[in-house]
Amino acid sequence: MPTTPEASQIDAAREWRRHLHSIPELGFGEHKTSAFVAEKLRSFGLEVHQGIGQTGVVGILRKGSGSQAIALRADMDALKITEQTNLPYASTHQGQMPACGHDGHMAMLLGAAHHLSRHGQFSGTVHFIFQPNEEHGRGAKAMIADGLFERFAFAEIYGIHNMPGMPVGAFATRAGPLMASEDNFEIRFRGKGGHAARPQVANDPIVIAAHAILALQTIVSRRVSALDTAVVSVTEVLTDGTRNVLPETVILKGDTRSYRPEIQKIIEAEMRRIAAGIAQSFGAEVDVTYTQEFASTVNHDSASQHALAAARATPGIDRVDAEPEPLMGSEDFGLFLNHKPGNFAFLGNGVDGANGQPLHNPHYDFNDAALGPGIAYWSSIVHRKLPA
Ligand SMILES: [Zn+2]
Ligand SMILES: [Zn+2]
């Protein structure tokens, strides 16, 4: 089964990667990026659909008579960071940078479409999904709302993220939780403002909010099982008070993480109960806004076994870790996994220089040496899942 892309195909992917690197665009602003991706997919002979979830693109490659279909996904957006790599192909868009390596994710997926359109010996349909706005967790939702699942029938979905600090040729994924959900909250206490010297005729919401800040920590310690994982962080305390004035309002803002929707529900419900109870006990009013920003990324069992087997059979991948520690960071791919079986995996980006810098760092760069293993992995997923 031909899973090794030719050197000329990897060279082409490197050119596309460097071009995409030079034109980074923020979420839902990926106009040049998506036009480039669509043009390449068309040039390989794929059926191409644009404008799905604003700037999203789907390319379709069919071979043989097989009725099975899968989807492979890359993300397209960049970050509001000023690049400091001094690379010859550095960002030409002031203040915008592909600092999460999504340029490399696109190049790997374009490389796979290129390779499979020419040398693929599979039977079935592959959907190449290029998703906008991953960084703010809005793109997957937009594509789904725009009919992604109804317009494109596929049974499973797979994703890759590059990982600095893992050597090139290393691959890691696991069945079950891989990345956390992210929810945000805003709790607004309204008391009664007044003179700092006469609190007895006011109703100081700072003291009320202070009780709430401490009580919120009991959600994880007393409402979530010790065998589960959750984080509740109050990250901002905003008041309209000043040196000698007790405020009228205190706003607490923060962020919560967990791996399971059940835990998200517990955190939200307990937060609302604690805020309402504390406000009532002090005679104040409270409003709670709780929003789900990212779903958790929980890999499905059989798709993960498939991903691991495909990686073990991929030329250029020489180290496969089937039990990596889950990360508390979040990834928009998780939302797809709430609807479809699939797997999200990490691919080594190297440990040295710009390739070993952390994601979202102004000195980071995707490693072109990871293109070959990435393209070969995609090819391996397709050939093993849709055998001719
Ligand atoms: Zn990112
Ligand atoms: Zn990313």
Image (spheres, rainbow, N blue to C red):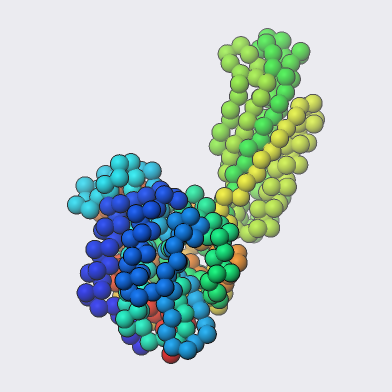
Q: In this view, does 65 lie above or below 29?
A: below
Query: Which quadrant is the N terminus positioned in?
Result: bottom left
Q: Which residue is drawn at 69% across and 38% down?
A: 288
**Along the line of sight, the residue nearer the viewer: 246 or 160:** 160
**Along the line of sight, the residue nearer the viewer: 262 or 132:** 132
Which image quadrant for residue 163?
A: bottom left
**Numbered-mark total:** 0
Q: Position of residue 173 (x, y in %)?
A: 47, 69
- Do we see residue 257 in this rendering? yes
Q: Going by the image, does 296 lie left or right of 379? A: right
Q: Position of residue 376 (x, y in %)?
A: 34, 76
Q: Position of residue 236 (x, y in %)?
A: 56, 33
**Along the line of sight, the residue nearer the viewer: 199 or 188:** 188
Q: Which residue is drawn at 26% across and 71% down?
A: 10
Q: Residue at x 35, y 70 (%)?
A: 42
Q: Is residue 280 above or below residue 244?
A: below
Q: Where is residue 370 in the image (x, y as percent from the top left)?
A: 30, 67
- Do we see residue 376 in this rendering? no
Q: Is residue 246 above or below residue 119?
A: above
Q: Which residue is drawn at 59% across and 36% down?
A: 253
Query: Which quadrant is the C terminus positioned in?
Result: bottom left
Q: Going by the image, does 65 lie left or right of 150? A: left
Q: In this view, does 213 lie above or below 298?
A: above
**Along the line of sight, the residue nearer the viewer: 64 or 108:** 64
